[in-house]
Amino acid sequence: MIVFDSADPEFFIAHVDMTLIDAPDAFDTFATDLPDGVNVFQALGELLRHHSQVTIVKLAGLARGGGAEFVTAADMTFAAIGRAGIGQIEALMGIVPGGGGTQYLSGRVGRDRALEVVLGADLYDAETAERYGWVNRAVRADELFRESPRRGGGHAVGRLFAGHVCGRR
């Protein structure tokens, strides 16, 4: 299992650095082995989606645009109530999500909700994201980061994962 979280309590991943628009060749060295029509951000999402290990996001800050796409590409996400926020903000900039947001999101929330999220460009809290199916569970922040007393430590996210897989909520 690979668990992603952020050292910055305000942000998970804010978005892609939009100055890259002025440097379209910035990732050319990373893109040499990618299939035609696939950009670096889509390739990252596909790497997460097809990884041999389960990928889990502990979302306690904001994930917008490219950050939301990263979250959506992971296998599971647990979001902190009162702290987490997620949104596809590209429509506010006159662009479409380019890192898999439109593809991955509809698989999680359905076509109609995905259209609402992408075209509305709103920021969604943990509980709404859970209700929509965007994240697996909305949990208290202290539960998200609590150390597990079992087997000498480890994050409680392992217990959350096990509980989710076994059907316990």
Image: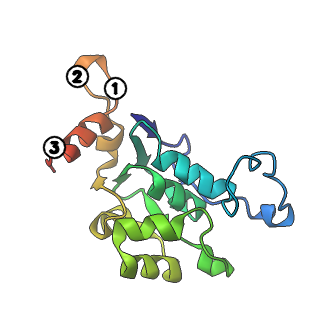
Q: Position of residue 29 (x, y in %)?
A: 81, 45
- Describe residue 153's horizontal placement relative to residue 17 as left or right: left
Q: Amino acid at mark 1?
A: Gly
Residue ID at (36%, 38%): 145
Question: Few, some or many C-alpha atoms within 10 Å of disc 1 (few <14, some 14-19, many ≥20)?
Answer: some
Q: Position of residue 27 (x, y in %)?
A: 78, 51
Q: Give the spatial CA distance, label 1 vs label 3.
A: 19 Å
Q: Which mark is residue 154?
A: 1
Q: Amino acid at mark 2?
A: Arg
Of helix, strand and loop, which one carries label 1? loop
Q: Which mark is residue 85?
A: none
Q: Give the spatial CA distance, label 3 vs label 2.
A: 18 Å
For label 3, the residue is 166
Q: Position of residue 1 (x, y in %)?
A: 39, 34
Q: Amino acid at mark 3?
A: Cys
For label 2, the residue is 150
Q: Give the spatial CA distance, label 2 vs label 1.
A: 8 Å
